[in-house]
Amino acid sequence: MSKLRNEGPIGVFDSGLGGFTVLRALAEHLPREDLVYFGDNARVPYGIRSEQTVINYARACAGILRSLHIKALVVACNTVSAVALDVLRAELFFPVLGVIEPGTRAGLAQCPNGRLGVLATGATVRSGAYPRAALSCNPDASIFVRAAPLLVPLVEEDVLSGELARLCVRKYLEPLVLDDIDALLLGCTHYPLLTPLMASELVALSGKNLPIIDSAEAVTAELLQLMASQHLATERAYPGKLRIILTDRPDNLDLASRWLGRDPAELNVTTVDL
Ligand code: DGL
């Protein structure tokens, strides 16, 4: 029974294709595991929606992955991790990991003065999930969380450099630099694509090379630990398969496959109706 469970895939879901940044880290560090990615691209963005709507969407996405007999679920979406993680954990019988806590721990580890800046979607900011995670990790931490609503459309349009992108990034980083942050945590799956631009703008604004942390690596490290402690790893010796399920025809698949570091022709993509 347990052997059978170990050969099940790991489920990953996000509101759209932004979670490919997390999927990429998982595929790199868990090359023998089967991965199934569910992207609700018919209903992206989640970050502008109410808490109850995000919870309803999260239940539906997790339900599809549960029916595929996953052995663990990684909620790549910060917005879902912020508002629906407890609901999913209470309703599902396999381990469910979100990105908020691992990301916050990794971010605070880079803050000598305990001052962490976070950029996230409006729904994530409103949830208060990042300050809660920071305070439970370090009661003396100071966390500065700002909504950055223009960044998801920029990434979706592949505008990752140039004057327009620079002005948008600067608009959100300026207040965080005034808050004198030690490090910047990217609280949305799309933002890692803007890391080079953010790094140069942080230098321009603060005169310092501030660390930028994205939660993909942090949640992958947490999953590896969990799989070791719960003996969940596959026993197969050959490379795992990657399956992608979306809720709409993916017209930005070519772009997103670059986020994943794969050729679009080699991706196994199907669509489902929710
Ligand atoms: N994937 C979402 C997140 O990480 C960002 C996009 C959205 O708003 O749905 O919060």
Image (cartoon, rainbow, N blue to C red):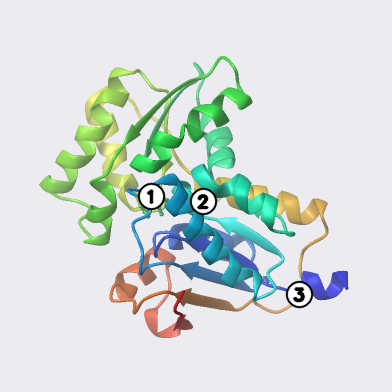
Q: Quadrant of residue 228?
A: bottom right
Type of residue at label 1?
Pro
Q: Which numbered disc covers residue 192?
A: 1
Q: Is residue 232 above or below residue 151?
A: below
Q: Earlier in the sequence, mark 3 or mark 1?
A: 3
Q: In the drawing, does residue 164 fall left or right of residue 195?
A: left
Q: Which residue is mark 2?
A: 216
The Cα–Cα distance between marks 2 and 1, rounded to whole angstroms, is 9 Å
List x then y, in percent, for residue 219. 59, 49
Q: In the drawing, does residue 232 fall left or right of residue 32?
A: right
The reply to whether the C-beta atoms of the residues labelled 2 and 1 are less than 8 Å apart is: yes
Q: Which residue is mark 3?
A: 7
Q: Is residue 25 above or below residue 261?
A: above
Element carrying mark 1? helix
Type of residue at label 3?
Glu
Nearest the viewer among 144 and 84 is 84
Q: Residue at x 30, y 49 (%)?
A: 194
Q: Is residue 258 above or below residue 136?
A: below
Label 2: how many residues lie within 10 Å, few (<14), some (14-19) or many (20+)?
Answer: many
The Cα–Cα distance between marks 3 and 2, rounded to whole angstroms, is 23 Å
